Amino acid sequence: MRAVILIGGMGTRLRPFTVETPKPLLPVMNRPFLEYQFQVLSRHGVREVVLCTSYRAGTFRRAFGTGRRLGLKISYVRESIPLGTGGALKNAQSLLNGTTLVLNGDVLNAFNLGAFLKFHRARRAEISIALTRVKDPTLYGLVITDEKGMVRRFLEKPSWDEVVSNSINAGAYLFEPSVFTHLPQGKPYSLERGLFPERLAAGARIAGYVAPGYWIDIGSVEMYLQVHLDLLQGRTPFRPGPRARPFKNADGARVTAGAGTKAAPFVRFSGSVSLGSKVRIGRGAQLTDCVVLDGASIGDGARLERCIVGPKARVGTHAVLGPGTALAGGSLVGDYSQL
Ligand code: GDD
Ligand code: MG
């Protein structure tokens, strides 16, 4: 079976980090985010992957090449202007055959492909949508199913008065080849706002598979921080990979770091902290539940809590970075600043 991954979005909610690096390539514990989802594909025997790129398209080929290093065969399609999730998928049609797995590229989902396929076939569905449960469905695509697991309604980004369940589209689909005839060629089209409601209205069989297990969409700064905390606290079945090692000066906290990272004496870590490579942490700094990306430096006595420091940023001595701070790569925070 082949998989298509949609990775052309601009990641606007994850700025400043996505100005240089597209969302699926953002580092998560010293490896590009998408490599975690590749682990799931490999585990289920999916070797051929088509990446639908648009925003910063060239960066993906540079990161993954032919995919050989990852045990995959990766092909690329590129939209010169973004065509939305449906337009992007249509572009990949000539590279696909048979039942196809389609994934959003900013989601980490440890689903069981065998069980998903079995469910899809048992319902003779044209499309099956993996579902997960969340606290705030207004940020996602709400999916309402009947007692047999068939989708009755699809509502992208509902308002609170439309929320009648907490099951949302997890961003993983199985598509029969016949679906492609309903996707327009070369013009913007959305799976979520176009294809799903239109096929439902036409009476097509769309099934909703409740996928148990870990799920996150890293589309916002808060969620990008959260995926690190979840990995560090062992709440996921994913392994961070060899470039993130447990950090020696870690006290009771869970801290990992890449190569060449150094902390001065009296640094205090608490909670879960992910440090990139070549990070410098000054004497007596305090870091709680945060992410510091490659080459950043944190001054003596600085205090960081629930924040993300971009690559090569410099945080001055005794500066305080509070919850939600998203410091752009290369920025300078003066001594004693409070953000
Ligand atoms: N190639 C290409 N072209 N890819 C795109 C385009 C495009 O024009 N637009 C979006 N994508 C990719 C993004 O890169 C991302 O991986 C995926 O499609 C989904 O886009 P997001 O922008 O992240 O959408 P969302 O998070 O608001 O909502 C989607 O995901 C939710 C689950 O995380 C929807 O599918 C919701 O229904 C779903 O619940
Ligand atoms: Mg998303």
Image (cartoon, helix red, strand yellow):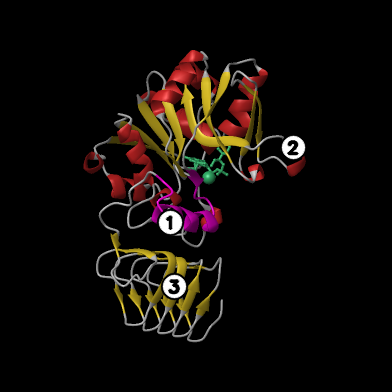
Q: Is 236 displayed left or right of 185 in the figure?
A: left
- Which quarter shows the N terminus? top left
Mark positioned earlier in the residue sequence (3 or 1): 1
Between 153 and 179, the one nearer to me in the picture: 153
Q: Residues within 10 Å of mark 3 (few under 14, many from 20)?
A: many
Instruction: Determine the CA span between mark 1 and mark 2.
Output: 32 Å
Check if residue 157 falls in the magenta segment.
Answer: no
- Which quarter shows the C terminus? bottom right
Amino acid at pointer 2: Glu
Q: Is 78 displayed left or right of 263 in the figure?
A: right
Q: Is residue 317 above or below residue 203?
A: below
Place of residue 54 in the rendered image (x, y in percent of width and height, measured from the top left): 44, 44
Q: Is residue 181 above or below residue 247?
A: above
Residue at 30%, 36% (x, y): give it: 74
Q: Which residue is mark 3?
A: 287
Res 190 quadrant in image = top right
Q: Which residue is mark 1?
A: 228
**Could you say whether the residue bearing mark 1 is in a helix, strand or loop?**
helix
Mark 3 and mark 1 in contact? Answer it, CB < 8 Å. Answer: no
Instruction: Determine the CA span between mark 3 and mark 1.
Output: 14 Å
Check if residue 231 falls in the magenta segment.
Answer: yes
Between 90 and 334, the one nearer to me in the picture: 334
Residue extent of the magenta highlight: 215-236
Residue at 50%, 32% (x, y): give it: 211
**Could you say whether the residue bearing mark 2 is in a helix, strand or loop?**
helix
